[in-house]
Amino acid sequence: MLSNFHYQSYQEFAALLDQLQANASSAQPDVAELRQVFEQAQQLFRQQILTKDTSSLAASVASRVRSYNTEIDKQLRLLGVDISFLQAARQAATLIARKAQICTRIQTLINYCNGLLEVSE
């Protein structure tokens, strides 16, 4: 079971992911805002979540948390690349493809975050 301290950080992270998803899935995503919220989410994850001590958690829970965190970190790095590609895209078909990739990646992150939040129940 996650501590309240861990749970609260993941809830904040999930809220930022929801903001990203809302922006990315809009008809005309605001790329500057998308980049800004992405950077906030990445900073929150790296400074508040990855640095949390998991030694007080049960061994099985700590292992799951580490596994999820590894995957979230990887997906965040890839999302950053996707956002850069979206910024550079000029053709409509490329914009649509990049936007779809970003939405898929954000949904993956949301699923991972929800998986972690369920650990605490």
Image: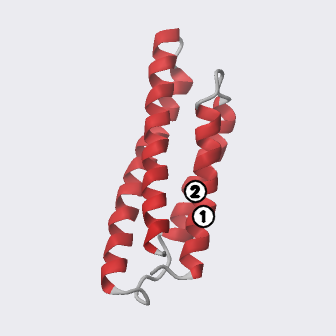
Q: Answer whether residue 91 is visible to the viewer in this image.
A: no
Residue 18 x/y as whole percent: 61, 47
Q: Secondary structure at mark 2?
A: helix
Point out the residue furthest to the front here.
Answer: 121
For image coordinates 59% across by 30% down, the residue present is 25
For image coordinates 36% across by 78% down, the residue present is 61
Q: Answer whether residue 109 is visible to the viewer in this image.
A: yes
Task: Give the class, few, some or many, for how many residues have Cα within 10 Å of label 2's Cα (few <14, many ≥20).
Answer: many
Nearer to the camera, 1 or 77:
1
- Determine contact: label 2, label 1, CB under 8 Å: yes
For image coordinates 56% across by 25% down, the residue present is 87
For image coordinates 66% across by 43% down, the residue present is 36
Cα separation between marks 2 and 1: 5 Å
Amino acid type of the residue tagged 2 in the rendering: Ala
Label 2: which residue?
A: 14
Q: Is residue 79 above or below residue 28?
A: below
Label 1: which residue?
A: 11
Which disc, if any, is residue 96? none
Image position of 115 (left or right of 59): right
